[in-house]
Amino acid sequence: MEENDRIPTNMRMLILLETLSEAGRPLSVAEIGEVVDLPKPTLHRLCTTLEDEGFLIRDSIGGRLRPARRTRVLASGLQMASQLHISRRLVLQSLASEIRETCNYVVAGESGMTYLDRVDTPWPLRYQLPIGAEVPFHCTASGKLFLSSLDVDELRRLLDTLPLTEEGPRAITDKDSLANEMAAIRKAGYSWDNEEFMAGMVAMAVPVFDQNKRLVAAVACHAPTQRMSFEDARDWVPRLKKAARDIETLMFGAD
């Protein structure tokens, strides 16, 4: 019996999920097999089981596997239960107390951005976007930040499938215009929402990178235009970036 045949089945599944996590992109079964040294029938069976149970999902284009909702919920739950969640929340609380507006920690989901953590503004006038809420990619600061992290081909494929709905009065609903917006965001190093998701709301978002400089989340703030203009919101970007760097240090250690 070969060494890999003695690895317990549950450990094989964890190794498979770890491989997808480290790749940072959808993988075919063959690509997973290049990393995970298991017999092809075993690998196909494990992938099929994880897919059937809702831990993996196949891309509509190409059929590659990526983490599905149950895997993301598991990952976020483990993170919430750790000391890391407490430390990250303290960073958000410090940021929100300084800006005095709602600050969020947001991650990409299957069809939009999901609020994983938030600290609300003390003002009674606020936009309620609770933890767990999912918002569109194309018209939110964090969503556009995620889109800007994709390469040109990935972005074009996703834009071909996204419903570019006119949520707010300034939402960009044309694919070419949105692609140009992504280029501007990549150049700026941060993203914005100028009444694109909701009338009377502005937002800014900055990236949180892993140790391989891959986007893993966004730190964002949003506010009513009655209290904060778009230009004033932009002035807070350096402070948002500092919070993002603090979170990166907590998650992945100092350089």
Image (cartoon, helix red, strand yellow):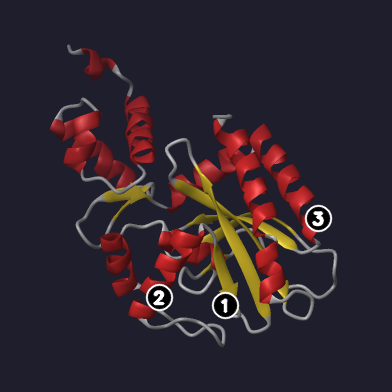
For the residues labelled 2 and 3, the Cα–Cα distance comes to 32 Å
Classify the position of the N terminus by image quarter: top left
Q: Decide: marks 3, 1 in contact (CB < 8 A)? A: no
Residue that badge 1 annotates = 197
Residue at the spot 51% in from the left edge and 57% down from the top edge: 189
**Residue toward you, 2 or 32:** 32
Amino acid type of the residue tagged 2 in the rendering:
Leu
**Residue toward you, 73 or 186:** 186
Residue that badge 3 annotates = 98
Amino acid type of the residue tagged 1 in the rendering:
Phe
Residue 36 point in image, percent of width and height: 25, 29
Is residue 82 visible in the rendered image? The answer is no
Classify the position of the C terminus by image quarter: top right
Does residue 220 appear to the left or right of 109 in the view shown?
A: right
For the residues labelled 3 and 1, the Cα–Cα distance comes to 24 Å
Residue at the spot 85% in from the left edge and 64% down from the top edge: 122
**Residue toward you, 204 or 105:** 204
Q: Number of callouts in the render?
A: 3
Choose top left, top right, bottom left or bottom right for residue 177. bottom left
Dot label at residue 178: 2
Residue at the spot 16% in from the left edge and 39% down from the top edge: 30
Q: Earlier in the sequence, mark 1 or mark 2?
A: 2
For the residues labelled 1 and 2, the Cα–Cα distance comes to 14 Å
Q: Earlier in the sequence, mark 2 or mark 3?
A: 3
Q: Earlier in the sequence, mark 3 or mark 1?
A: 3
Residue at the spot 53% in from the left edge and 83% down from the top edge: 167
> Helix, strand, or loop for circle 2?
helix
Amino acid type of the residue tagged 3 in the rendering:
Glu
Residue 168 point in image, percent of width and height: 56, 84
Label 1 vs label 2, nearer the camera: 2
